[in-house]
Image: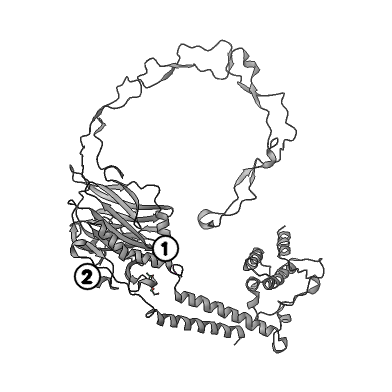
Amino acid sequence: MRRHQLVLLAVLAVTRQCSAEDAADSSTTASTYYQVPSLSKDEAYLFEPFASSDLFDSPLSWVQSTSKKDHADSTEVEKYDGEWAVESTNVSSMAGDYALVLKSGAKHHGIAVKLDRPYSFSGKPFVFQYDVKFMNGQECGGAYVKLLQKGSLSDLKQLNDKTPFTIMFGPDKCGKETHLRFIFQHKNPQTHAYEEKHWIEPSSLKTEDWINSKKSHLYTLTINPDSTFKIYVDQNEVGSGSLLEDFKPPVNPPAEVDDPEDRKPEDWDERKTITDTNAVKPANWDEEAPAKIRDPSATMPAGWLVDEPQMIYDEGATKPVDWDVEMDGEWEAPQVENPKCKDVGCGDWEAPLIDNPQCKNGGCGPWTAPLIENPAYKGKWAPRRMPNPDFFEDKEPYKMTSIDALALELWSISNQVLFDNFLITDDKAVADKVATATWKLKESGESTSILPAGLDYKTIGIIVATVVGLLTIVLVRSYFRKQPATNVRTEAQTGFAQRPRPQSGGGETDTTVHRDIDANIGDIRRQTETTTRVLEVEELVDDVPPLEGEAGSGDNQESPESDLDVEPEVVDDDTNTATKDDAAVRKRRTVRRE
Ligand SMILES: *[C@@H]1O[C@H](CO)[C@@H](O)[C@H](O)[C@H]1NC(C)=O
């Protein structure tokens, strides 16, 4: 077995050991055990802090949807088969804290739970609160909650996108578009039909930041009996207003509308100007001659560059880092105005246009009669206004349809979305008390954690073990390097360490350039202190296409130090023009390209 393989095995063994110890530790390291707050029956209509790790065994019984999206061409893809789980929140200061987790990416997820008792909008404030954390950020998907209309779903398994809700509230994102949704269903008192009313979000919302932070954020909605509302995120007010004024379309329709029966009279003249029918063409008007001609006395200015293009590719432009050839096509530098054209001009030169001197007497070109004001002009016609037959005035949109279930009906591209501490109450003080005892603790645990989000002790253990292992490889290698006598394969044979210094410049061929670069990488790797320079040179080498008959040479370039098994190259010292300077490599590459 080769030396470096042995070292690799050692690294693996250390890594295994590390993670095994970590796993054994994790059950005992918890110093504080999180205590789920308890609320009295009359404080909340629903309170779900996920006290137990078993979702379907909790006092509230959550039900996963087995339905599919409700439209005609429903296919397999439209099933609500996204997975849900209750998992530890893994916040070190919150041992014993669990959350509901949306587990599958790119799937429809449906889950619902009945309230302890229905909430009816009968004179008390409505307060809804929960916290959500996007462990993996979100590319496209919602984390909003639907509060279902009482009696709309006798079997929660039937939950789908058409299940009637009263309120929908929470963050939503797709690509660059983010929303903090607050939608309510308003019942038309005349037709009894429901219509969605969407909150007009202020531009100051930081929804994008809340979603991308990968931390828990607390969303609170309060609706008062006077139909005013407030929205808080992390207990800070981020929006407020009235159900009557801040929604689209508005709750109440306009009192007056256009009369659909009213028609524009036949003789209604909307033309502001008309052509003067009394005007006649002047006798000496020449319809054949052009009104403008090229100035025959003009000459091309000195310094005009006929062969220079007006626009050139911007040499300073670089391909954007997030450019995706598959999505965006091949990248081309943008075009800019040619600076050489600034002084005089470029391209085909044409004499400037001047008035045709032949037209001096009357006029040239096609003749048209002039326009005059229309004496019969009556202005723009508009239909008569009439009282809106569908008019109603609902002064209390607060009085929404009662709620008896909470549902998550979500499409999500990203997985690991954590939901926690669902609360419906009629007292904001209860919501604040719950926030202090739940989200606030978790939030401070998340922000004081010494580990960045997504990095646990196990991962860190593996990283440390790998670094130690790599250092060991380097040490072992340099130890053997110092004792060439005991080593079957000396550095001179491998051809990496003891490259001859440059001798002469002539006779450079493709093959030698290629070898030079190999040699330079070996040298530069040992001499540069920062990895950035190594990366730079590797990039340069990647740009050089492999030579014919040199299959696999690309692998050698990638990591020359790990290639002790490869037969040493034959290097012709006389044609070797290697230098240590990576600038030389760069220069040579340019030469090759030309
Ligand atoms: C918490 O850690 C466990 C074990 O590493 C993991 O399976 C689980 O997904 C983590 N929970 C969350 C919410 O990330």
Please state which amino acid type lies under the numbered disc 1.
Lys
Against 265, residue 454 (above or below) is below
* Image region (quadrant) for ligand 1: bottom left
Residue 228 rendering spot, x and y as whole percentages = 26, 47
Please, what secondary structure does the residue beneath circle 1 have? loop
* Residue 402 within the magenta-colored segment of the rendering: no
Q: Residues within 10 Å of mark 2 (few under 14, many from 20)?
A: few
**Residue on which the image places disc 1:** 214
Residue 499 rendering spot, x and y as whole percentages = 75, 75
- The number of numbered badges drawn on the structure is 2
Residue 399 rendering spot, x and y as whole percentages = 20, 49
Residue 576 relative to residue 131: left or right: right
Residue positioned 21% across, 42% down in the render? 395
Q: Which residues are magenta?
A: 449-454
Chain-order first, disc 1 or disc 2 = 2
- The quadrant in which the N terminus is found is bottom right
- Residue placed furthest toward the bottom: 486
Residue 304 relative to residue 261: left or right: right
- The quadrant in which residue 213 appears is bottom left
Against 379, residue 310 (above or below) is below
Residue positioned 63% across, 78% down in the render? 562
Please state which amino acid type lies under the numbered disc 2.
Pro
- The quadrant in which residue 157 appears is bottom left
The dot on residue 59 is 2
